Amino acid sequence: MATAHDSHAHYHSGDMDIHEQTSTFHSVMAMFKWGSLAVAASVTLLVLWFCTPAGPLPGIVVALIMVILGVAFLREKKSPAAH
């Protein structure tokens, strides 16, 4: 019968390939980032449209400005070239 100590005998710290986990992490973070922008712009649009006397046009304009600024601030920055 194998013990808990025996199950760790084949593990070597630092030897695992973590590219798949890293890729999944970056994908989830991107979904949260862009999803948050979409939710914020949608809520702003709907609140200005239906909960204020402003109407649909100001809601659309403000939501569009939020999306443009959000894309500008949230997009991936280009890393400087290695020398």
Image (spheres, helix red, strand yellow):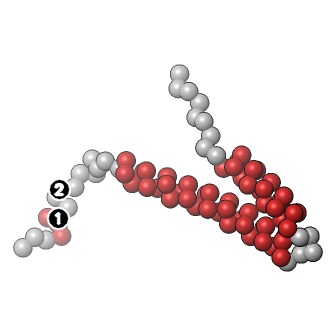
- In the image, what residue type sits under mark 1? Ser
In the rendered image of this protein, does residue 42 appear above or below residue 12?
A: below
Measure the C-alpha gap from mark 2 to mark 1. Answer: 7 Å
Relative to 1, say whether 7 is above or below.
above
Q: Position of residue 17 (x, y in %)?
A: 31, 48
Q: Are marks 2 and 1 in contact (CB under 8 Å)?
A: yes
Q: Residue at x 43, y 50 (%)?
A: 23
* Residue 58, quarter of picture: bottom right
SS label for mark 2: loop
Determine crowd level at label 1: few under 14, some 14-19, many 20+ residues with C-alpha closer than 10 A: few
Specify the quadrant that holds the N terminus.
bottom left
Is the residue 75 above or below the residue 49 in the image? above
Dot 2 surroundings within 10 Å: few (below 14), some, or many (20 or more)?
few
Q: Which residue is mark 1?
A: 7
Which sits in the foreground, 83 or 29?
A: 29
Q: Nearer the viewer, residue 19 or 5?
A: 19
Measuring from the top left, give residue 32's x and y in whole percent.
58, 61
Q: Residue furthest bottom?
A: 51
Residue placed furthest toward the left: 1
46 vs 73, nearest the viewer: 46
Under circle 1, the secondary element is: helix
x, y (%) of residue 22?
Answer: 42, 51
As drawn, the label of residue 10 is: 2
Residue nearest the observer in this picture, 48 or 16? 48
